[in-house]
Image (tube, grey):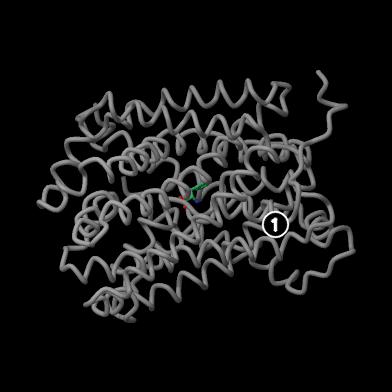
């Protein structure tokens, strides 16, 4: 109703925008998935390919998203409707759906980080020190009421921040949590690399092994880059819609890419030296984070503190990403006339409910075609919806909306983007082909 007269919310500053976007990008993907993928796919060789992909393709799609969002001053669906119409809003719809699916299970894992933070002080270290980290993890994740309760707490905090709005909620909390995350990460790295025997872990992590750099590794790097930079579902588009017209989009996007990639690479330096110093077998994914690491921390003097610091880091990373997922979905409803509190609350509760089967997935909830519910949600969103969204966003800017995109990215001619032609070419050709490749190779259920 008051939609037309109401001014769209905006970021308070360029720094606030960058930290919010970096908060979205830096998430569970950086801390548990990237280091593990790197160790598995050839260390420094993989990092080189990953960095190239981030700055060529990831950066280009990010600028494309931000440009569409800022031009339209609308959510993912509304933006495509406004700037082009036709079938294009379907791209936005896929994004809203992906946000819905991702947050439903992301919040379950976010809940685990809260549990582990407190548990660090109340018994986890004793159990992990006795070699029972795997057993107690298994005990926790099959205790469905407890897992759901923590999932609820995590989702409630996410709703609260989105409910408070763009400046007073998202920006404010990201401005506190992102620097805190960085400080904690540096402290953990210093602790880790100064342990005796840390060298072996550093070697495992960075030693380039080009023979492991297969087509599969390149596909993994592409998929990881996409998920890690929060691309393909209109997240950067929605955040871009709150940017003022003077902020240069390319330099903002570069900064977000640099922060995201640095945190991913640095996380490995916090994890592997410690894992190898204590001769613990490096697990993968959730296992690495919730089983291997508690066993490692338990062996350090002051174990509770190190463990709590790490899970606090993981919590900050997770919640600043979670709010961006809820914001994408809420923004659609807000632009359709709902109030912000209503959109955040109703959508957050629906995602919480959809997350319940994921919360039960390790306790034997029904599977979907042989996959755990949580894995199935992740597969549909990350392997299908995000790459498809990315292809269409790149094609849209490269072929359909090119002249307008140039105008928007150059701030109506007042800002010179030196790589404009390269950017357009990547959106036209390289990004769609590369993403299509991830999509096709990633389609194995
Ligand atoms: N980038 C986050 C991570 O690395 C997850 C995330 C947040 C995301 N928003 C997104 C992924 C949007 C894809 C799209 O964990």
Query: In the image, is residue 399 above or below residue 415?
Result: above
Residue at the front extreme of this rendering: 302
| Quarter of the picture holding the C terminus | top left
Q: Is residue 285 left or right of residue 312?
A: left
Give the percent coordinates (x, y) of residue 337: 73, 22
Camera-side residue of 422 and 191? 191
| Residue occupying the point 50% across, 65% down | 261
Q: Is residue 263 left or right of residue 78?
A: left
Give the percent coordinates (x, y) of residue 368: 28, 31
| Quarter of the picture holding the N terminus | top right
How many numbered marks appear? 1
Give the percent coordinates (x, y) of residue 142: 20, 32
Query: In the image, is residue 410 above or below residue 244?
Result: below
Using the rendered view, name the quadrant where residue 257 is placed: bottom right
Using the rendered view, name the quadrant where residue 162 is placed: top right
| Residue occupying the point 66% across, 56% down | 18
Residue at the left extreme of this rendering: 130
Q: Is residue 121 left or right of residue 392?
A: left
Number of residues whose C-alpha sits closer than 10 Å to that of mark 1, classed few (under 14), some (14–19) or many (20 or more): few
Using the rendered view, name the quadrant where residue 425 is placed: bottom right
Camera-side residue of 364 and 198? 198
Q: Secondary structure at mark 1?
A: helix
Camera-side residue of 364 and 317? 317
Query: In the image, is residue 258 above or below residue 325?
Result: below
- Please name the residue that numbered disc 1 is placed on: 15
């Amino acid at each position: 109703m008051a939609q037309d007269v109401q001014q769209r919310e905006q970021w308070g500053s360029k720094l606030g925008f960058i930290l919010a976007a970096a908060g979205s990008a830096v998430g569970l993907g950086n801390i548990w998935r990237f280091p593990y993928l790197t160790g598995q796919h050839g260390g420094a060789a993989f990092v080189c390919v990953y960095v190239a992909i981030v700055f060529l393709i990831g950066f280009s799609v990010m600028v494309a998203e931000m440009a569409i969002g800022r031009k339209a001053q609308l959510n993912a669906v509304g933006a495509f409707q406004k700037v082009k119409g036709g079938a294009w809003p379907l791209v936005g719809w896929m994004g809203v759906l992906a946000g819905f699916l991702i947050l439903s299970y992301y919040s379950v894992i976010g809940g685990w980080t809260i549990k582990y933070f407190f548990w660090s002080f109340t018994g986890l270290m004793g159990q992990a020190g006795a070699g029972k980290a795997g057993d107690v993890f298994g005990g926790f994740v099959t205790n469905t009421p407890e897992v759901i309760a923590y999932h609820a707490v995590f989702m409630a905090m996410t709703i609260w921040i989105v409910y408070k709005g763009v400046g007073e909620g998202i920006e404010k909390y990201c401005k506190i949590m992102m620097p805190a995350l960085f400080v904690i990460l540096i402290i953990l790295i210093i602790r880790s690399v100064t342990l005796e025997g840390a060298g072996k872990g550093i070697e495992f992590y960075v030693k380039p092994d080009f023979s492991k750099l297969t087509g599969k590794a390149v596909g993994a790097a592409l998929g990881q880059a996409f998920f890690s930079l929060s691309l393909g579902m209109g997240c950067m588009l929605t955040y871009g819609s709150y940017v003022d017209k003077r902020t240069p989009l390319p330099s903002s996007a570069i900064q977000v890419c640099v922060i995201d990639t640095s945190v991913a690479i640095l996380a490995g330096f916090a994890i592997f030296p410690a894992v190898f110093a204590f001769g613990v077998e490096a697990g993968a994914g959730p296992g690495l984070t919730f089983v291997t690491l508690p066993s490692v921390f338990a062996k350090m003097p002051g174990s509770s503190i190190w463990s709590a610091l790490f899970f606090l880091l993981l919590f900050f990373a997770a919640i600043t990403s979670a709010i961006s997922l809820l914001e994408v979905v809420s923004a659609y409803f807000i632009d359709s006339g709902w109030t912000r509190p209503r959109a955040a609350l109703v959508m957050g509760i629906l995602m919480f409910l959809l997350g319940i089967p994921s919360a039960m997935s390790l306790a034997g909830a029904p599977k979907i075609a042989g996959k755990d519910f949580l894995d199935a949600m992740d597969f549909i969103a990350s392997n299908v919806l995000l790459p498809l969204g990315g292809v269409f966003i790149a094609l849209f800017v490269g072929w359909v909306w090119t002249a307008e995109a140039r105008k928007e990215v150059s701030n109506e001619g007042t800002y010179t983007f030196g790589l404009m032609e390269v950017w357009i070419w990547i959106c036209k050709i390289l990004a769609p082909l590369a993403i299509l490749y991830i999509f096709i190779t990633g389609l194995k259920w």
